[in-house]
Image (spheres, rainbow, N blue to C red):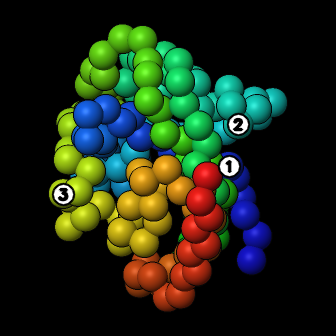
């Protein structure tokens, strides 16, 4: 199986809460998710991360770290296969604002809305938010449900 692109996903963390975005359009509409998007041609993954946070939340990350790398494979549509670079942002300039793509809201880290998130999120997001570097691979079946997965977590 081939990966067809790279994307970023980031989570703002402050005072025991995490900022998630309700996806308003595009891939994942109707789900709470981290903030991010696709890498554009000629762009480094860091540039993608910075651009996407500015476009979707109108903030500028100041203190952040990369805490994960996820691989997603979709048997129903291989165009969706992607590598996702996961970042946690601890300090930023500006305040998260609603954009055309996402509506942000703050959630307690210990009470995330997994019922309205991607089905893979409970497997990798808690260790990422706990500061553990997480690598994972998910294969989604023809019904877009998880067929198999593997998650590796290491202490930072």
Q: Residue at x 38, y 34 (%)?
A: 12
Q: Quadrant of the N terminus?
A: bottom right
**Mark earlier in primary sequence (1, 3):** 1
- Locate residue 56, reporting x and y percent: 41, 27
Name, please, the residue furthest toward the right. 42
Question: Helix, strand, or loop for circle 2?
Answer: helix
Pointer 2 residue: 45
Q: Residue at x 36, y 69 (%)?
A: 122
Residue 156 seen from this side: yes
How many numbered dots are placed on residues in this image?
3
Query: Distance of mark 2 from mark 3, alpha carbons?
Result: 30 Å
The correct choice, above or below, for 54 with respect to 138 in the image is above
Q: Which mark is residue 101?
A: none
Q: Is residue 41 left or right of residue 109?
A: right
Mark 2 vs mark 3, foreground winner is 3
Q: Which mark is residue 6?
A: 1
- Answer whether labels 2 and 3 touch (C-beta < 8 Å): no
- Answer whether labels 2 and 1 touch (C-beta < 8 Å): yes
């Amino acid at each position: 199986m081939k990966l067809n692109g790279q994307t970023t996903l980031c989570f703002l963390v402050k005072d025991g809460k995490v900022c998630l975005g309700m996806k308003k359009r595009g891939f994942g509409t109707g789900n709470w998710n981290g903030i991010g998007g696709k890498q554009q041609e000629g762009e480094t993954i860091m540039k993608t991360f910075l651009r996407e946070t500015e476009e979707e939340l109108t903030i500028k990350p100041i203190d952040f770290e990369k805490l994960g790398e996820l691989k997603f494979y979709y048997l129903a549509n291989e165009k969706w296969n992607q590598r996702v670079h996961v970042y946690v942002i601890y300090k930023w300039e500006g305040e998260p604002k609603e954009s055309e793509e996402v509506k942000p809201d703050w959630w307690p880290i210990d009470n995330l809305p997994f019922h309205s998130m991607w089905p893979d999120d409970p497997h990798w997001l808690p260790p990422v938010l706990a500061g553990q570097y997480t690598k994972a691979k998910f294969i989604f079946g023809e019904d877009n449900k998880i067929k198999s997965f593997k998650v590796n977590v290491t202490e930072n």
